[in-house]
Image (tube, rainbow, N blue to C red):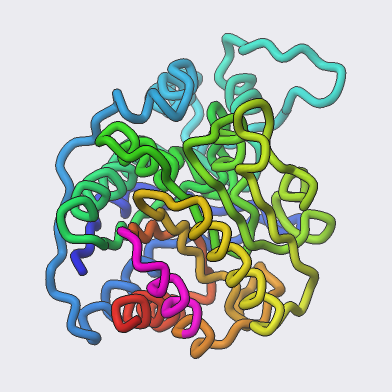
Amino acid sequence: MKVFSSESHRLHFPNGELFGGEFVRPFECPERWDYIVDRLKQRGYSNFVTPGELDLSVVAKVHSQDYIQFLENAWNEWAAEGYTADALPTVVPARRMQQRIPNHIDGKLGYYCMAMETAITSGTWQAVKSSAACAIYAQKQVISEGSAFALCRPPGHHSGKDLYGGYCFLNNAAIAVQSFLDDGAKRVALLDVDFHHGNGSQDIFYDRDDVLFLSLHGRPEDAFPHFLGYQDEYGASNGEGFNVNFPMPPDTTYDLWGDALNQACKKITEFSPDAVVVSLGVDTFEDDPISFFKLSSDNFKSYGERIGQLKLPTLFVMEGGYAVEEIGVNTVNVLDAYQGA
């Protein structure tokens, strides 16, 4: 299996994030990438590919043009105000406020954000573009060879049509799904196994019947992003019935989680897609610092094998996972088991 990755991810690393009322070192850090690469090499993965330039025309089919322009210009607008620290929003358009795009960068940050822990830095846009390029180039590889791993950083599944947050700016997995469709696929399944609900992916595909979105996650009553991911969100218009959420309570073990995965895989089989994109977050791990599921490292082998049993062209796109020292083991356990299925 080829691995698509870029050293440009290092250009994005904010000075801190807001957590528990304090500014702390971001959980989404460059070492996550390093531990995964180290483990891949230990396990014999040697075919690493650096992607070329990002085709923004594909991105524009997933994200709004004004949002793309915001991401491209945000840091320069922030710096033009004389600010030197990372760009963070201070105000958001809450209920009964106007939903109009302000002129000032402080207002723009609030308009486009969905979570205030996520900062923009001088190198964010370049890192974001390289991350999305990893997903697109890996998608092309799946067409020719049947599987690939896009080691994306920053991650993407919390990014919606016109919003960022949860460490995500462009929705790498959604962009890859759209790229499959552009290349002739009639139907694509997007399976999100990250602990946190893929609110951005749901937002993008909620009214479409050519994409089946399935998310296994901590129930929104208890877990970020809190305001999306309920079981009764089925899709809208043409997409009704093509959005499937599996919210689960604190301390969920693999017995319950694995049953949800089996249900999701059965729905994928019934959907009969031309390809599967997996939003691969490994923050379901029992020792993850910002999650509450209880999967062991061996459990990642079990579900990698289950995904492999679908016998479908499959693209794995890296999302979350914040138990940094174990992230490589858990990620590669999925990939190894998938290939051995």
Q: In this view, does 83 lie above or below 299?
A: above
What residue is drawn where x is 37% and y is 38%? 186
User: Front-most of 173 and 169?
Assistant: 173
Q: In this view, does 341 lie to the left or right of 233?
A: left
Quarter of the image with the N terminus in it: bottom left
Q: Is residue 338 above or below residue 18?
A: below
Tag count in the figure?
0
User: What x and y, as percent, mark residue 194?
Assistant: 56, 62
What is the span of residues highlighted in magenta in the rendered image?
302-313
User: Front-most of 337 and 221?
Assistant: 337
Q: Is residue 242 above or below residue 56?
A: below
User: Front-most of 298 and 302?
Assistant: 302
Rendering quarter of residue 130: top left
User: What x and y, as percent, mark residue 228?
Assistant: 73, 44
Q: Is residue 292 left or right of residue 280?
A: right
What residue is drawn where x is 31% and y is 52%? 9
User: What x and y, as percent, mark residue 121?
Assistant: 43, 40
Q: In this view, does 312 lie to the left or right of 207?
A: left
Q: Is residue 281 left or right of residue 216?
A: left
Outermost residue toward the bottom?
A: 298
What residue is drawn where x is 37% and y is 36%? 178
In reply to whether residue 52 is colored magenta, the answer given is no
What residue is drawn where x is 39% and y is 82%? 333
User: Front-most of 17 and 214?
Assistant: 214
Q: Is residue 318 above or below residue 1?
A: above
User: What x and y, as percent, mark residue 140?
Assistant: 20, 47
Quarter of the image with the C terminus in it: bottom left
